[in-house]
Every structure is written in C-alpha cells, then in structure tokens.
Amino acid sequence: QGQLVESGGGLVQPGGSLRLSCAASGTRFSINTMAWYRQAPGKEREFVAVIRGGGSTDYVESVKGRFTISRDTAKNTVFLQMNSLKTEDTAVYYCWAPIGGLGTWGQGTQVTVSS
C-alpha cells in the first residue's frame, strides 16, 4: 500500500514564503494526479491545488497568483510553492493522491503564518 509523506511546513511571517513537498512511496506506478488540501482550526478541509497527468493545474481562488503546484513525476513527488503568505493561510496542509480505492492522504504538515 502506497503512502504519502509531507514536509516543509513551519512558522513564517506574513508576506513570507514556504515550499511544501509530498513524496509517494510504496507504489510501483507513476502517479499522474496529486493534490494539496488544507484544514484550518475549526474549519473543514478544503481543496487548495491539483496537478494532473497532462500538467494542467487548478487552484482555489484564494491562493491564485500566490501558490504554485509542481511535480517531479520520476520521483512521484509534488511541491507547493507558497508566496505572499497571509495569516489566513494558517492550516495543516495535506497531500492527496489516487492510491488505493479511495485515495491516500499524507499525515499533514503545519503551516503557521504569524508575526
């Protein structure tokens, strides 16, 4: 059974940048679609960004122009470059990939934007 491991979270001041990584392991197959979600305290988990097999991407409106999703297909790794961070971006960020019947989630990485 494949698994996903995120890294790169931390504490950053408003206006700062962070780069998240998510690496898939335990699967023999190349993963075409990978996505990022986030969950802020007291809120439901929400979609942030997705990258598909052909390289097309989509973002939630609130991060467009600030976040960029990319991937290294050979390593089954997806990245989320987050620039111009705002306090409202504070959340646990989760990686998701269509591994297994219902997909697989990573364990999450905390991003805190605060002065």
Image: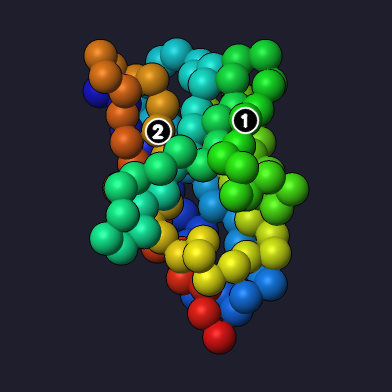
At which x and y percent is residue 9? 48, 62
Q: Are marks 2 and 1 in contact (CB under 8 Å)?
A: no
Q: Establish if 18 lies above or below 37.
A: below
Give the secondary structure at mark 1. Answer: strand
Where, quadrant-wise, is the C terminus in this rendering?
A: bottom right
Residue at image position (34%, 45%) is: 45
* Residue 106 in which image quadrant: top left
Q: Is residue 17 left or right of residue 112?
A: right
Q: Tell me, what colour scheme is on the image?
A: rainbow
For the point 45% across and 13% down, which residue is it?
29
Q: How many marks?
A: 2
Give the SS element for disc 2. strand
Query: How far from the left and from the top, in percent, is residue 31?
Result: 49, 19
Mark 2 is surrounded, within 10 Å at the Cα level, by few (under 14), some (14 to 19) or many (20 or more) other residues, namely many
Is 13 rendered above or below residue 42?
A: below
Q: Position of residue 113 (x, y in %)?
A: 52, 73
User: Mark 1 highlights which residue?
Assistant: 58
Residue at the image point whose x is 62% and y is 65% from the top: 85
For residue 74, side relative to residue 92 (left or right): right
Query: Quadrant of residue 77 in the image?
Result: top right
Disc number lying in front (2 or 1): 1
Query: To which residue does mark 2 refer?
Result: 96
Q: Residue at x 41, y 49 (%)?
A: 38
Q: Amino acid at mark 1?
A: Asp
Q: Amino acid at mark 2?
A: Trp
Location of the N terminus (image quadrant): top left
Please indicate, yes or no, whether residue 40 appears anywhere in the rendered image. yes
* Any part of residue 75 in sight: no
